[in-house]
Amino acid sequence: MKRELINECRLRFPAISRNEAFSRSAVAAFAVQQDPTVEEVAAIKTAVSEAVTNAIVHGYRDSEGDVDLFMKLFSDGTILIQVKDKGRGIPDIKAAMQPMFTTAPEDEERSGYGFTVMESFMDKVRVRSAVGRGTTVTLEKKLRGKASPKGT
Ligand SMILES: Nc1ncnc2c1ncn2[C@@H]1O[C@H](COP(=O)(O)OP(=O)(O)OP(=O)(O)O)[C@@H](O)[C@H]1O
Ligand SMILES: [Mg+2]
């Protein structure tokens, strides 16, 4: 079955920490039209805030800029979310996605588990990045919703 786009939303906000909480609420508000379960909402909120936090604290570590949040809903129940920054970029994506890998200074107490968390809560996580140009994280999850009690 070909999946059709049924709704989409684009948001742009400055890379400041108060927008981590905002992005969590925004994605939950967008997803609610699909009648998701509490667990599904919690999963996408967590994954999105990890990606947005990364854009703010790593992407724009030495600069200011905007984060773009694109959300799309498809006819098969899939939600696709893109978090995009035009920050410093990731030199080695494979290494960055390993558990416990972090480039944050020690006093920031980052554990290096953001990508691992995204992967555990979402069906698909894709990362595109270019050094000096920015990073796009694409998150995808099929929302089965309350209508399907067995989660099938
Ligand atoms: N948007 C981004 N721009 C530049 N570098 C990034 C970006 N997102 C992730 N990275 C790099 O990938 C590393 C791993 O990210 P990850 O979210 O897994 O861990 P962390 O952010 O360091 O720690 P935690 O998420 O547990 O607080 C980061 O330390 C950083 O070097
Ligand atoms: Mg992180």
Image: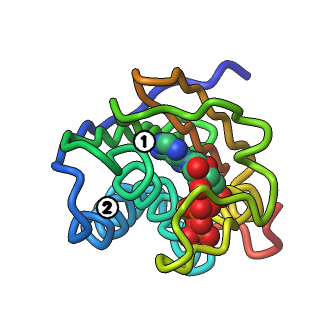
Q: Helix, strand or loop at disc 2? A: helix
| Mark linked to residue 116 | none
Residue under label 2, please give it. 23
Q: Is mark 1 within 8 Å of ligand 1?
A: yes
Which quadrant of the figure shows ligand 1?
bottom right
Q: Helix, strand or loop at disc 1? A: strand
Q: Are marks 1 and 2 in contact (CB under 8 Å)?
A: yes
Q: Residues within 10 Å of mark 1 (few under 14, many from 20)?
A: many
Image quarter of the C terminus:
bottom right
Q: Is residue 147 or residue 97 the one in the foreground?
A: 97
Mark 2: amino acid: Ser
| Mark linked to residue 83 | 1
Residue at coordinates 46% horizontally, 38% vertically from top-left? 82
Quadrant of residue 100 within the rendered picture: bottom right
Q: Is residue 134 left or right of residue 104?
A: left
Residue at coordinates 55% horizontally, 26% vertically from top-left? 129
Mark 1: amino acid: Val
Q: Earlier in the sequence, mark 1 or mark 2?
A: 2
Task: Please determine whether, in this image, residue 113 is positioned above or below residue 10.
Answer: below
Task: Please determine whether, in this image, residue 15 is positioned above or below residue 107.
Answer: above
Task: Please determine whether, in this image, residue 24 is positioned above or below residue 135.
Answer: below
Task: Please determine whether, in this image, residue 127 is positioned above or below residue 81.
Answer: above
Distance, label 1 to label 2, CA atoms, is 10 Å
Q: Is residue 144 or residue 137 the one in the foreground?
A: 137
Q: Is residue 69 left or right of residue 31?
A: left
Residue at coordinates 47% horizontally, 55% vertically from top-left? 54
Quadrant of residue 140 within the rendered picture: top right
Q: Is residue 106 left or right of residue 21?
A: right
Q: Is residue 32 visible?
A: yes
